Amino acid sequence: MSFKIIGTGSYVPEHIVTNDDLASIVDTSDEWITQRVGVHERRVSVNETAADLAYKAALNALSESGVKPTELDLIIAASISGETLCPTVAGFVQSKLGATCPAFDINSACSGFLFALDVAAGFYARGNVKKALIIGAERLSKIIDWKDRSTCVIFGDGAGAVVTDAGDNYLSSKICTKGGSDVIEIPSFSGSSPFYESPGKSPYIFMQGQETFKFAVNAMTEDVKEVVSKANLSLDDIKYFIPHQANIRIIQFASKKLGIPIDKFVVNIEKYGNTSAASVPMALDQINKSGNLNRGDLLALSAFGGGLSSAASIIRW
Ligand code: UT7
């Protein structure tokens, strides 16, 4: 027994930051960002936390599913940008919703939502839950160095969520970690212990762009092939590919390497940038709300990022 998705939701803050806006802060241009990354604009929070965004995406997903917060047996949130380590983003959402179930966060950076789906699948396999809420939510603007043009033009804030019920629609999955901090690192507060020799690192995102790019294309291609094969399917059986929205060129490379037409990939990077753990559930909500999904359609989800981590799964709609 695994699960089926019975509702999706998403939420982004209202404030739009365009490439031209960024060109007034750092040495960049609309032309560079559009050509090298594919982002035209992104949403940036002015007064909402990652948990606030998560809550609003959750309300949206619950409303579509018809599930009441008190019926939830589990809430998992994937995030790297919560305002507090404790309470967690999921704990905040639980309290705001008036739910009473266990709620916890997981962190696997941009792959976090797919890791969370896999964790939820374990609860379903043990028969422990019926209705679950799984969220990816980020206020990445909090952990960006707004003076670093190689990262601040890429990311955005947002949240996506799904509500699940018992079913057999999570057909296969793969989660991977290639640990190390040389390619991507986001240090956190190292404390004020008089005994600890703090390295005094900047608390902002550090990323070796080209190394991450290579990792991303390979991970996406290999992970998708593997989960398709594990589900005894062929790539042609998949109606939509829902990739992490990190760089349009990564999606184009993967499309070529996999031999899949680009129009089968759900893309919204131009509007929202890279929203890390929120990116896949936001794109899933977009394709669901577009009315282009029918029950039985097969979807391939794929994500990669800090960790380094990557993940993919096949879901029957
Ligand atoms: O979600 C987590 C996973 N993250 C990713 O998957 C990100 C993967 N990596 C990427 O998307 C790309 O590597 C970046 C978008 C981060 C960078 O693009 P790139 O094509 O790899 O650029 P680059 O780092 O090789 O830099 C090329 C040039 C450099 O100038 P020089 O040395 O050639 O003169 C950079 O200084 O572009 C320059 N550059 C910029 N120019 C204008 C870097 N950032 C900018 C900028 N505006 N924002």
Image (cartoon, grey):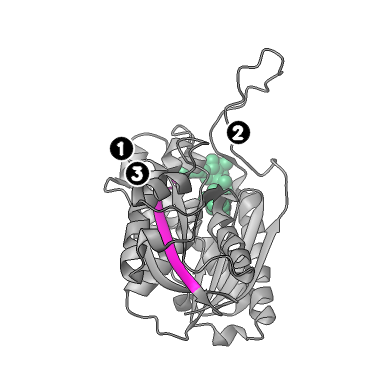
Q: Which SS class for mark 3?
A: loop
Q: Nearer the viewer, residue 243 or 109?
A: 109
Cα–Cα gap, marks 3 and 2: 21 Å
Q: Main secondary structure of the magenta part?
A: strand
Cα–Cα gap, marks 3 and 1: 9 Å
Q: Which residue is mark 2?
A: 187
N-term mark: 3 or 2: 3
In the picture as drawn, the residue positioned furthest to the left comes out as: 14
Task: Where is residue 214? Give x, y as percent.
Answer: 65, 57
N-term mark: 1 or 2: 1
Q: Is residue 245 above or below residue 55?
A: below
Query: Mark 1: which amino acid?
Result: Asn
Whether 48 is among the magenta residues is no
- Disc number placed over residue 44 in the picture, else none: 3
Residue 274 seen anywhere in this rendered image of the structure: no
* Cβ at disc 3 under 8 Å from ligand 1: no
Which residue is at a point 47% across and 80% down the rendered structure image?
317
Task: Where is residue 113? Give x, y as percent.
Answer: 53, 58
Which residue is at a point 60% across and 64% down the rendered structure image?
123
Give the class, few, some or many, for how many residues have Cα within 10 Å of label 3's Cα (few <14, many ≥20).
many
| Magenta-drawn segment | 153-165
Which residue is at a point 38% across and 40% down the rendered structure image?
49
In this picture, residue 3 sits left or right of residue 201: left
Cα–Cα gap, marks 1 and 2: 23 Å
Q: Quadrant of residue 231?
A: bottom right
Which residue is at a point 46% across and 45% down the rendered structure image?
91
Q: Which residue is mark 1?
A: 47
In the picture as drawn, the residue positioned furthest to the top comes out as: 194
Query: Mark 2: which amino acid?
Result: Pro
Q: Nearer the viewer, residue 27 or 232?
A: 232
Query: Mark 3: which amino acid?
Result: Val
